[in-house]
Image (spheres, grey):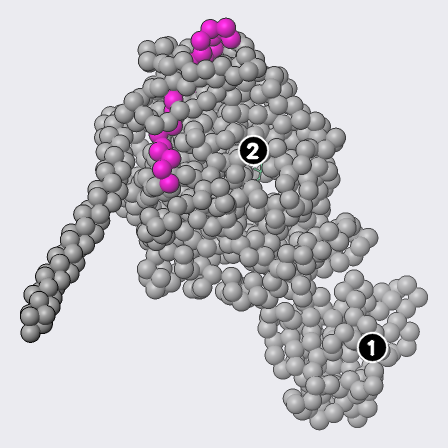
Amino acid sequence: MKIKKYFRGSGRVLAFVFVASIVWLLFDMAALRLSISEVNSQLLKELVVKERELAKRQATKGTKVAGRDFKHPLEKVQMALGEGKKSDRVERKVVEVYRKTGKFNGEVKAHTAAPEKDTGTQAGANPQGSVKAKMQEKISKKSLKKHNSGTDTTVRNPIREQATETGAKEKERRVIALSRTKAPPAVREEGQPKKVIEAIKLQSSATKATTKVVPVQDTKLSVGAGLSQKANNSTLKTAKRGAQATASAIKERPVNIIQRDKKEKVVVVISKDKENHKNDSVKGSVDGNLKSAPQPGALNVGKLQASEPVKLLNISGVRRSGGLHKVMALDVTHKPRDVRAVGQFGHAAVVPLDKQEESRRRWSEGYFNVFLSEQIPVDRAIPDTRPPACSEDLVHDDLPTTSVIFCFVDEVWSTLLRSVHSVLNRSPPHLLKEILLVDDCSTKDYLKEKLDVYMSQFPKVRIIRLKERQGLIRARLAGAAEAKGDVLTFLDSHIECNVGWLEPLLERVYQDSRKVACPVIEVISDKDMSYVLVDNFQRGIFKWPLVFGWSTLPEDYIKKNNMKDSDPIRCPVMAGGLFSIDKKYFYELGAYDPGLDVWGGENMEISFKIWMCGGEIEIIPCSRVGHIFRGENPYQFPKDRQKTVERNLARVAEVWLDEYKEVFYGHGYLHLLNKNVIDVGNLTAQIQLREKLHCKSFKWYLENVYPELEAPVVKAEGLVFNVGTRKCLVLDKGSLFFETCDLSKQNQHFNYSWVKTLRQNTSCVSPQSTGTGVAMEPCDNTKTHLRWMHKTNKVLTEHLIAEVSPRGVPRRVCLEAGPKADGVYLKACEASSSFQKWQFTHYYTQ
Ligand code: UDP
Ligand code: MN
């Protein structure tokens, strides 16, 4: 009993201890949770406070700006439409934007008009959800698992397009195809990029520059940091002024000297804005004097001697904690130096009456208003056109770095500079590894030494000079081969990156290295240089024959998928000129087909390659870049322009389109099948690459990525019914006969193809030049004598018309059934003869 009692007593004690420890454990866990969330919220709070401060500063500036007669392009468009005075981003209006291929033949042009309304689709869907939503997912994962920043990579690719802003009334978008070029001698198709080949002489201005400078992206430096731009001042002159202003601004800052490296280069870190940048340091090196030059958005340490202590700014505002922060609204130009400058804030510029002749004369230098462009500051402010939600988006602190690659040939000075400055001024410095300017053998003098001198002021800018004209595609490959960043960002050389443009692109690549991220391409008017918004929910598509265009996602689709205007939009094809792609992935994909020449088609090539070989293309609405869409290419095509583009497209079709290449050829490009007209070059490497990557079929692409495209693989198919005999054609033992029509009989099934052949499997009906017979022969799309016209002639609508050339004289003949259905013959065409009328079971096109 005693023992029992004892046990009972100790049982109580044990129970008490047990309960107590449970309670203790619960308390402990709660405390732990609290402390974790405290740490998190503390970090978040700091970020938020930082953002708020920034926002406050900007808001103050913004008000002032608005007070000075700033007209937002959106307002402008809306006012033109009489839809209200205030700008409302949600209500932004479409401007006409199109990618222009230029001088295509008539048949191609027929495809250029229609503004497209998507019919709804999975491809346009956004199964990915918003960046923000993804972030939420990641946050929880990240808190458990330490992120391995070194392994994540992503890809994006560029766009090629031309557009014209024609005013709000012309809401419809026109679509025209484009493409681009050839094989770079120095580029490998896989693995790491290797050194540029002999054909390409690299000449880095950065190596020539004696002194390096550190770009400063702090908004506090915005005033005076950019180039001055008074109408009559030379850019260089005014740029120097800007540089001096910057230098003096810097002098006022407290600086810490850091250390020297072994090569006697001074490596320094300057602590600057303690509040914003307390954890960051930036290293730079200075090994000589810096020529005093313009420093928009960058610190010019100009007069410093190597022997002097050199001071560089600590410029990064990002904590490398593996955490998240709100997209940075860095914009050195946010408070422009001269609010009244021409074109300031993306405003339309006006040519004075006495300058109109000059302005007209200079148009062809760039096929846009070159005169006005010169008047506009190279560091002008532009309106923040992002959907409102974008500024709240979170991105990772440890995003990959990027090399921005600008390829150019004979680019206009002012637009080239504005492109570069927009990147320097609106990109977080720690993410901008470098800017590579690939000079595709320009002929203009100002793009030589003058450009070297100008750019030597920016340590991040390197110029790569190509010895021979390579064309856009191989120029990009040359740039990629030199790039040191994790991500390649390709841009055209007449763009303006908007605030917060970079992080959303890199975030997407960071999340999935097989995603290729494109910014929304906004319009810089070729006429008045104003920055014009484009409509939301636009995606890149194509029509036959590989004509690029934009189309709006249908409303019900947007609703069904609960899409916000800031959500990424999946695109069947990219425009081509502007995109970010993970460098490693770019090479895994085999980069561009280096056999593509000059310009055109490369956007199709890379788009098909990405989708079919496991990647994705997205437009990221929170990233916005303005682009001058031009009516003509301002540079020479070494060969005929049209032929160059057509040849590029044929290469793409041959490698990627499988049986659908006939659809391409059938839309006005049958002449490309004639090897005497166009030599598409060797495709072996490209075909092998596709096999090696185990890429999916084009049929898969159409079904899964772009199901809205009408792409019947033949024009007509089924039984071939003769109206006169009321019987059907049958192929038996290599000869054609007639039989009672029977759908179940496979030997009565024929195809009428896009390349106009009448075939069963691989046998084609061949009109004989001598006599009146027809025979079967192996199909060969290059053989023009196998082509039959059907449904193209207004009078002979149902006839099958061929051309024969007995004794070299071409003659038109029609396929006719013998009156007793005893055979098929070639006869002179007769409109009324029912024995010459043929009908297929299914017609897929008229
Ligand atoms: N480009 C080039 N070499 C060429 C053709 C073009 O480097 O042979 C450059 C051009 O300067 C521009 C970019 O490639 O920066 C895209 O060309 P463009 O703007 O003419 O194409 P679009 O925007 O009209 O499609
Ligand atoms: Mn362009």
Q: In this view, does 389 lie above or below 267?
A: below
Q: Earlier in the sequence, mark 1 or mark 2?
A: 2
Residue 764's mark? none
Kind of residue at badge 2: Lys
The picture places residue 473, in percent across and down from the top left corner, at 64, 41
Relative to 623, is 843 on the left or the right? right
Q: Is residue 419 above or below residue 659?
A: above
On the image, numbered disc 2 is attached to which residue? 484
Q: In which quarter of the image is the N terminus?
A: bottom left
- Residue range of the region highlighted in magenta in the rendering: 294-322
Residue 357 seen in this snapshot: no
Kind of residue at badge 1: Met
Q: Residue at x 56, y 33 (%)?
A: 484
For disc 1, the neighbor class at 10 Å (few under 14, some 14 to 19, many from 20) is many
Element at label 2 = loop
Instruction: Single out the mark in the foreground, 1 or 2.
Output: 2
Q: In which quarter of the image is the C terminus?
A: bottom right
Relative to 24, is 784 on the left or the right? right
